[in-house]
Amino acid sequence: MKNDIKVGLIGFGTVGASAVKIINENNAKVSRRAGGKIIVKWIADKDITTSRGIKIDKKILTTDAYRIINDPEIDIVVELIGGVEPAHKFIIDALNNGKHVVTANKAVLAKYWEEIMETAKKNGVDVYIEASVGAGIPVIQALHDGLAANNIKSIYGIVNGTTNYILTRMLEDKKDFAEVLKDAQKKGYAEADPSTDLEGKDAGNKLAILSSIAFDTVVDLKDVYVEGISRITRKDMLNARELGYVIKLLAIAKAADGELDVRVHPALISCEHQLAAVDDVYNAVYFVGDAVGPVMFYGQGAGGASAASAVVSDIIYISRNIINGIAGRVPSVFFEKGKSKIKIKPIDEIKFRYFLRFIVLDKPGVFAKIAGVLAKYGISISSVDQKEQDSGSKVPVIITTDEAKEKEMRKALAEIDKLSVTKEKTLALRIEKGE
Ligand code: HSE
């Protein structure tokens, strides 16, 4: 019977280095839990000279990922390079070579979910993906196994650490966007291309993964409506706070009348909601199941050590299966090829309450003009606030509305933005109840 497990890591960045550190430092415990010794046989990276601050035998370093993928002794391939290619090819080739795979790669999973799950099944191997959403928060396993009995009604997630850190620090430290982003990059939270975080794509990928599991379907990034945080200012956050809300980048999925509403965008959520207290790099996913009701998972959603916690746990899980001779027998996610896709509900058809920030000339009749256009599209105003300004003739006017269809709101704002009194493109944020 096999009693040691050989692992090869592709990608020796922040997460890879932290994973090796955990395996080395906690080796006795990790191996006891796995039921056999876990040995890191190879580490592949383009850069094998820069020190990662951990002790390793230099002989295990290689620049060739195929040293791992084609090595008959390797049991588990851990893919941690990020990005779509060549990560996708490495994963597929490893699965086809009979290797079990652990990956944190949300972009590849969101894009190639069916292909990856199908290739794993065909080859009788496991693919474990816990680190792909919420880093070390065990949200995938909890959703997949712990909540398996439920029809999931909705998911509300704060699943991008970089943007949550930026929003929190802009508000609390009065720092500007660029400065806080630099900080997040230094701390290893941001993606190689931080626009992936800022524009909501990273959260979109994570939502696609959660929704595919929660709703037994296949959702990919192109199904998810995505907006980022780049237009949010500290003033918007202060205005929202005065109204009793916080602004968060929310990843939302809801099952509604046989359709699926899946979207990522900045939104106002009540200060009373559990998600409102999720700050900095912390992530949280709030699920509502028909039997269990609301459940929330919370923890550090980015950073090497947190993601490595999930990666090493996945390695332990697979190792235990290998050692007990049951690896690959039970797929790690429910998946049936050709499962019918749930129709995605177009955002235009969804009704929201809105927080609108107009920048307009401060002169008589301006408010009447805005209110007139809103009324023309059947949009009812819920509150209005205009702060006194000392300087210039431009003023922000904050309006919240009752529920209106997105389609009508877009038409109204297009018309308002064309008025000569409107001085900047209007910011429209959706207000969410989170239930
Ligand atoms: N860039 C990601 C984030 C890292 O900020 O959440 C974790 O997936």
Image (cartoon, rainbow, N blue to C red):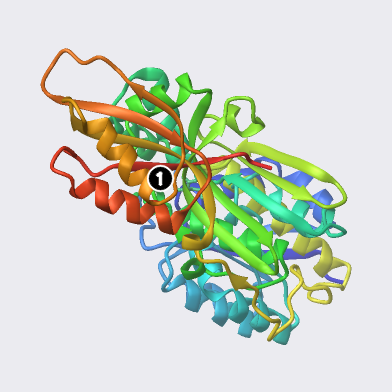
Judging by the rendered image, the residue that carries numbered circle 1 is 190
The residue sitting at 56% across, 60% down in the picture is 262
Residue 280 visible in the picture? no
Q: Amino acid at mark 1?
A: Ala
Q: Is residue 414 left or right of residue 169?
A: left
**333 or 176: nearer the viewer:** 176
| Residue 333 sits in quarter | bottom right
**232 or 334: nearer the viewer:** 232
**270 or 161: nearer the viewer:** 270
Q: Position of residue 293 (x, y in %)?
A: 82, 44
Residue 262 visible in the picture? yes
Q: Quadrant of the N terminus?
A: bottom right
Q: Position of residue 153 (x, y in %)?
A: 74, 55
The extreme left residue here reads 392
**231 or 414: nearer the viewer:** 414
Q: Is residue 77 left or right of residue 86?
A: right
Callout 1: CB less than 8 Å from ligand 1: yes
| Residue 340 sits in quarter | bottom right
